[in-house]
C-alpha cells in the first residue's frame, strides 16, 4: 500500500506579518530540503531552456606517446 501524502493547507497572513521561511526550512530534514532544491532547479531549467534539457556527453581522445 503506498504511503499517504500529507494534505496541503493554506494560511493567510496580512502583508508584512508573514512568517520567515528560513525557520520552516531549518525545521525540515536535509533530504527534504535537497529534494525541494532539486525540484526548483528543474522547474527553472525547464522554464529557461525548455523541457528535456540534459547534459551533453563530451568525449576526448588522448593519444599518449609510446616509450
Image: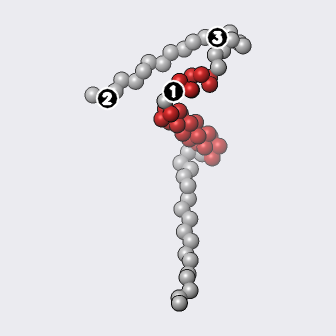
State the image coordinates of residue 18 (x, y, percent, origin top left): 66, 15
Q: Is residue 6 left or right of residue 45?
A: left
- Of residues 60 and 44, which is closer to you in this image? 60
Disc 1 or 2, which lies upstream in sequence?
Answer: 2
Disc 1 and disc 3: Cα gap in Å? 22 Å
List the residue tagged with mark 3. Answer: 13
- Quadrant for the N terminus in the image: top left
Contact between marks 1 and 3 (CB within 8 A): the answer is: no
Kindly identify which numbered label has been placed on residue 28.
1
State the image coordinates of residue 15 (x, y, percent, origin top left): 71, 12
List the residue tagged with mark 2. Answer: 2
Q: Residue at x 55, y 81 (%)?
A: 63
Q: Nearer the viewer, mark 1 or mark 2?
A: 1
Q: Residue at x 56, y 50 (%)?
A: 53
Q: How crowded is the residue under tag 3: few (<14 C-alpha within 10 Å), some, or many (20+)?
A: few
**The quarter of the displayed image where residue 47 is located:** top right
State the image coordinates of residue 23 (x, y, percent, origin top left): 59, 22
Disc 3 and disc 2: Cα gap in Å? 34 Å
Q: How crowded is the residue under tag 2: few (<14 C-alpha within 10 Å), some, or many (20+)?
A: few
Kindly tell me whether residue 39 is visible in this rendering: no
Disc 3 or 2, which lies upstream in sequence?
Answer: 2
Q: Nearer the viewer, mark 1 or mark 3?
A: 1
Q: Is residue 38 left or right of residue 22?
A: left
Q: Residue at x 54, y 39 (%)?
A: 38
Q: How crowded is the residue under tag 1: few (<14 C-alpha within 10 Å), some, or many (20+)?
A: few
Disc 1 and disc 2: Cα gap in Å? 22 Å
**The quarter of the displayed image where residue 59 is located:** bottom right
Kindly identify which numbered label has been placed on residue 41.
none
| Residue at the farthest left position | 1
Amino acid at each position: 500500500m503506498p504511503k499517504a501524502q500529507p494534505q496541503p493547507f493554506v494560511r493567510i497572513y496580512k502583508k508584512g506579518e508573514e512568517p520567515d521561511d528560513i525557520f520552516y526550512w531549518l525545521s525540515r530534514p536535509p533530504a527534504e530540503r535537497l529534494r525541494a532544491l532539486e525540484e526548483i532547479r528543474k522547474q527553472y531549467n525547464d522554464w529557461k531552456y525548455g523541457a528535456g534539457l540534459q547534459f551533453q556527453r563530451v568525449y576526448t581522445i588522448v593519444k599518449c606517446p609510446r616509450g
